[in-house]
Image (cartoon, helix red, strand yellow):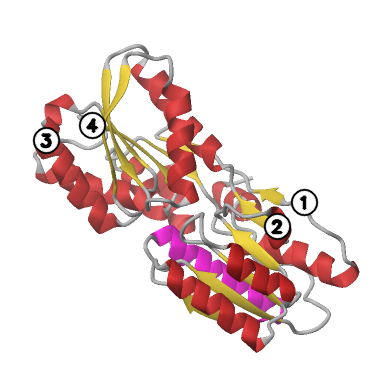
Amino acid sequence: MNIRSTLLASAVTFLPVTAMAQELTIGFSQIGSESGWRAAETTVTRQEAENRGIDLKFADAQQKQENQISALRSFIAQGVDAILIAPVVATGWDEVLEEASDAEIPVILLDRTVDASDDLYLTAVTSDLVHEGSVAGQWLVDTVDGGDCRIVELQGTTGSSPAIDRKTGFENAIEGHDNLEIVRSQTGDFTRSQGKVVMESFLKAEGGENICALYAHNDDMAVGAIQAIREAGLQPGTDILIVAIDAVPDAHLAIANGEMNATIELTPNMAGPALDALEAYLADGTAPPKWIQTESRLYTAADDNQAIYEVKKGLGY
């Protein structure tokens, strides 16, 4: 099987075989458009809904929880059949989720979790965020192979489950390896622009020659950091090792160009499994598991990243 068919079959199979028996109206509260991956998730969700004959009501929260809570209350008032939400942060959802529950509107979490009782939502479709961080950390452990390595970390949005879990996983992986040390850690808010700004501050504070590796909680921050590293007169991927998460097209291109070393894939197709679970639940009351896990994969220079980039660049990123 070639690269294109493998990717389309395993990571981005967007088009389901059957449509829903009747048209549904579903609200989708998206965090915003802070990254290429987030844009791809929005595109794929819309494609899934259209193909299934679903009327999808979309709300962009612009990275603000209060906007999401307002959107959920609007969906509830409209009497939608279900709600999809990618929560911007993990806490503060109990009240509005209880309102949805009282209205008998099932809620499905996409790509992030919340700190609330799991009886307030139908299921959560996510990757194993801790595992993603662990894969990144283990890659660095293996790559430096006992050599001393001072690490800078670009964290995601403060309080978000990806930022919390990807940090936990990475720290778990490097624990006990005294040669690896995180010397600077700061949020870049999952954006390319802030990744660049924060990396500039890391380089100024530590000196590029004293930074062995960058771990970024998503690829967009890493791509921004790559620009900062280049502008500092250093070679990203060589002078400073770079590992990040999401496997967006620009990350594959950066690896192909030797400016990034590794990325862990987060599929943007959360809506497919979510809507499959919803269809079954609405059809006969079949309750899905509370967690539906998506698959992740490590990509390095050993992969044909140029070919992967060519496939992914048209998928909405």
Callout 4 crowding tier (Cα within 10 Å): few <14, some 14–19, many ≥20: many
- Residue 242, image x and y in percent? 31, 36
* Left or right of 35 in this view: 308: right
Query: Mark 2 to mark 1: distance in Å?
Result: 6 Å
Quick one: SS at disc 2?
A: strand
Q: Nearer the viewer, residue 168 or 143?
A: 168
Instruction: Give me the residue at 40% from left, 68% from top.
Output: 64
Please say if the residues under marks 2 and 1 sit with CB atoms less than 8 Å apart: yes
Q: Return the disc, 3 or 2, that comes first in the chain's sequence.
A: 2
- In this rendering, is residue 27 above or below 253? below
Residue for badge 1? 289
Q: Return the disc, 3 or 1, that comes first in the chain's sequence.
A: 3
Instruction: Give me the residue at 47% from left, 38% from top.
Output: 299
Q: Return the disc, 2 or 1, that comes first in the chain's sequence.
A: 2
> In the rendered structure, which amino acid carries the disc numbered 3?
Ala
Residue for badge 4? 240
Q: Return the disc, 4 or 1, that comes first in the chain's sequence.
A: 4
Magenta stretch in the rendered image: 36-55
Residue for badge 3? 205
Q: Is residue 48 rendered magenta in the image?
A: yes
Quick one: SS at disc 1?
A: loop
Callout 2 crowding tier (Cα within 10 Å): few <14, some 14–19, many ≥20: many
Regarding residue 121, the answer to whether it shows in the image is no
- Residue 214, image x and y in percent? 29, 35
Q: Return the disc, 3 or 4, that comes first in the chain's sequence.
A: 3
Q: Nearer the viewer's eye, disc 2 or disc 4?
A: 2
Q: Is residue 279 rendered magenta in the image?
A: no
> In the rendered structure, which amino acid carries the disc numbered 1?
Pro
